[in-house]
Amino acid sequence: MEIIALVGNPNSGKTTLFNALTGANQKTGNYPGVTVSRVSGVLRTPHGNKFELLDLPGCYSLTPKAPDERITRDVLLGDQQGSELPSAVVCVVDASNLERHLYLVLQVIDLGLPVVVALNKVDLAEKLGLRINVELLSEELGLPVVPCQANRGKGVLDLKHAMRHPLPHPSRRKWQASKQTESAIHDLTAKLESEGMQKPSAHAVHLLADAGYRGEDQPALDPSIQSLAVDLASVCAREGVSTEEEISQARTQWVQSICKVAARRQGVDAQAGGLTTSDKIDQVLLHPVWGWAFFVGLMFVVFWSIFSLSEYPMGWVEMGIDALKQGVSTLMPDGDVKDLVNDGVIGGVGSVVIFLPQILLLLFFIGLMETTGYMARAALLMDGVMSKVGLSGRAFLPLLSSYACAIPGIMATRSMDSAKQRLLTILIAPWMSCTARLPVYSLLIGMLLAGYGAAVQALVLGGIYGLGTVSALFAAWLLAPKVKGEEEVSHFLMELPSYSKPDVSFIVRHLVERAWSFLRKAGTVILGLCILLWALETYPKPKEGSPAADDPALALEQSYMGRMGHAIEPLVKPLGYDWRTGTALVAAFAAREVFNANLAISYSVEEADDEDKFLEQLRGKLAKATWPDGRKVYTPLTTMSLLVFFVYALQCLPTTVVVRRETGSWKWAIGQLVGMTAVAWLAAFTVYQVGSLLS
Ligand SMILES: Nc1nc2c(ncn2[C@@H]2O[C@H](COP(=O)(O)OP(=O)(O)OP(=O)(O)O)[C@@H](O)[C@H]2O)c(=O)[nH]1
Ligand SMILES: [Mg+2]
C-alpha cells in the first residue's frame, strides 16, 4: 500500500486530523510533543483509493534536535528501516502561525515529494483577524492548499479529495542561494545522480542544509557521498559561505515574502499592542504569585474530588459487588468452589475494581489540563523549580504524564533534546505516583484516617504525591553530576498554545478506553493472580482432625502462602509488616493493585461485620488483624510505613522493560529497579523504627 505521511510543527493538529481521516482514536493534546512515535492507519478516499496514513511526531524543522523529530526526518528521507518512502506528504500548518509553519513546508518541498498543505486551525486565525488568501498561497507554493478545522471535522472531506490518485506533482524548489552554494548543490546532485540515487537534488540540498546529517552515520548513504558533501561545504566555508545558514536564510526570506502577500491582518491588531484572550489569561496563570496559587488550589481540588466526588460511583460499584456476593452465597453450595468465587474472585478483583472511579477522576483532570492548554503553562511555571535541581522545564510534561502511568511518561521524554536531561527524567519518572498506586493509597488512607473528611484525606494524598515528586527532584539533583552530558541546562523554550475549550467528548472517549483497558486487566491478569493467590492460601488443606482443620487462621499459616510468608517475614518485620502484608507486597511486584487483592484474600478468614459494605468490611478486617501476641498489625505507623514503601518501590515490570528500550541499556533499567526498591525498604524502615522509638 502506498504511504502518505502527516508532517507538521508540534501541536498543529496532525493527530486530530489523523483520527478524523482514519477513524482512529490516537491521543491528542493542546501542547507540543504529544505524539512521539510513528503510528499508522488506513485512509480511504471517496474515489476508492486506499493509502497507509502515517501520523508522525511534530517537528520544527528537518534538522532533528530530539529523538522524536529524528523519526519524522528518517521517514521522509526513506532512512527508516523497514519503511518505504512516502508517496505524498500532507503538511499540517497552523493557520494562526503561518510564517513559522511554512518553513517546514518548504523543507518538505525541497525533498521532492508531492505535498498537500492542510491549512488547519482556520478558526483560530479568524479570531486573530488573520485573512489568508488560500488561492494565492496555493499558487505560490505550487501545490493544493486545503483550509480545515480538524477538531470539528471541517475540510476533512476536501482533504481526502486532494489526496486521490493521481497525486499532485512535486513542487519545484522556491529559493535561490549564492553562486557558491548553488554550485555545491549542482556538483553534489551530479554525483548522486551518477550513483543512481533517487531524487538526487533533494538529497543534495538536504546534505548541504544540515551539517549534523552529513556528519553522522547514515546507513542509507554511501560514505563517499557524505565525504563529498563535507568537502563541498568546507570549500564554501573557506569562501566565507555557510551552506546551512544560507539555505535557511533563503527559505526564511521566501516564506516572509509570501506571507506578506497571502496573509493579512484585519481589525484589531493583536500583535501590535492588543492582548489576545490567551495573553490575558496568562497574565494571571503565569503570575509569580497568582499563578502558583492557582496551581496549588487546582491540585487540592483534584485530590479532594478523588475522595468526595468519587463517593457515588464507588457506592454503585460496591452495591454491585455486594449483590454478587449475596447471590453467590445463596445460590452456590458450600465448598471450595464457593470460597474461590467469593474470596478469591469477587473479594480479590473487587478490592481493585472498586477504585476505578477514583482513577478515572484523576485521569479526567489530567485530560482537562491537556486539552485546554494549561499543561504547557504548568510546565513553564515549574521551569524555575526544575532548573534548581539541574532539570530542564521540558522534563515537566513527561513527569506529569507519569502520574497517569510511567510508561507513556517515559516515552514522552523522546521530545527532549538533551540526552542527559532525557536520561535523568527517565530515571526519576516512576516516583511520580501512577494510577496503579491509587487503589493502594486509597485503601490505606481510608484506614488511617477513618472518620476524617475528604479534605483531610485529600491533603494526605496530596502529601504522598508531593513526597514522590520532591524525592524525584532530589534524586535528579543527586544523579545529575553522575550522568554524562552537557552541564548547562538548556533554556526552556516551549511554545505556549492558545487556550481552548476542554475537549470533553475526546476526554470521555479516552476515559472509556482507559476504563475498558483497566477492566480487561482486572478480568485477566489480576483475576488470574487472584485465583493463584487463593490457591496458594487454601492448599494444602489441613488434615481432618488436626488442630488447623477447625482454625482457619492456623490453616492459612500452614498453606503454601503461609510458609512462603514466614520465610520472608524477617525481611518485612523491621518495616512493621506481618507475613500476610509481606506476601501482598511481594505479589504487588507482578502488578501493584494485586496488593489490595492479596490482603482481601488472606484476611478473608477474619470475622467480618456483615452489616458493613464491601470496602468497610475489608478495612474492618485489616483493622482487626493482630500479631500472635495480640498487638494490632495495622497501626497508624505500619500504614504510614506501607504508604511510603509504595511511593518509592518500582513494582512494575513493564516499566523496567520500557526503560531498557528507551535508554538502550539494562544497566540503567536494573539499576533503577534495584535502587528504587532499596530506597523503598530503607524509607519504610526509617518511618517505622523512628516512629516506634518516638511513640
Ligand atoms: N481551535 C482548533 N484547535 C484544533 C484544531 N485542530 C486541532 N486542534 C487542537 O489542537 C491541539 C493539538 O492537536 P494534536 O492533534 O494533538 O496536534 P499534533 O500536531 O498531533 O501535536 P504533536 O503530536 O504534539 O506534534 C488539540 O488540543 C486539538 O484539539 C483546529 O482546527 N482548531
Ligand atoms: Mg500528534
Image: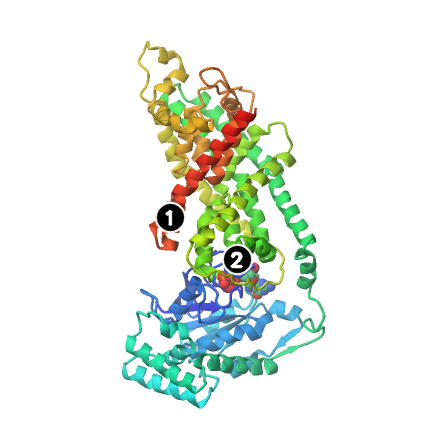
Q: Secondary structure at mark 2?
A: loop
Q: Name the image quarter holding residue 171.
A: bottom left
Q: Nearer the viewer, residue 660 or 99?
A: 660
Can you see residue 572?
yes
Measuring from the top left, give residue 198's x and y in whole percent. 32, 79
For residue 314, which numbered disc appears in the image? none
For residue 669, which numbered disc appears in the image? 1
Ligand 1 neighbours mark 2 (CB distance < 8 Å): no
Q: Amino acid at mark 1?
A: Ala
Q: Is residue 594 above or below residue 540?
A: below
Q: Secondary structure at mark 1?
A: helix
Q: Residue furthest top?
A: 545
Ligand 1 neighbours mark 1 (CB distance < 8 Å): no
Residue bearing mark 2: 392
Labels 1 and 2: the sequence-earlier one: 2
Mark 2 closeness class: few <14, some 14–19, many ≥20 residues within 10 Å: many
Q: Residue furthest bottom?
A: 179
Q: Nearer the viewer, residue 422 or 344?
A: 422
Q: Is residue 194 left or right of residue 131?
A: left
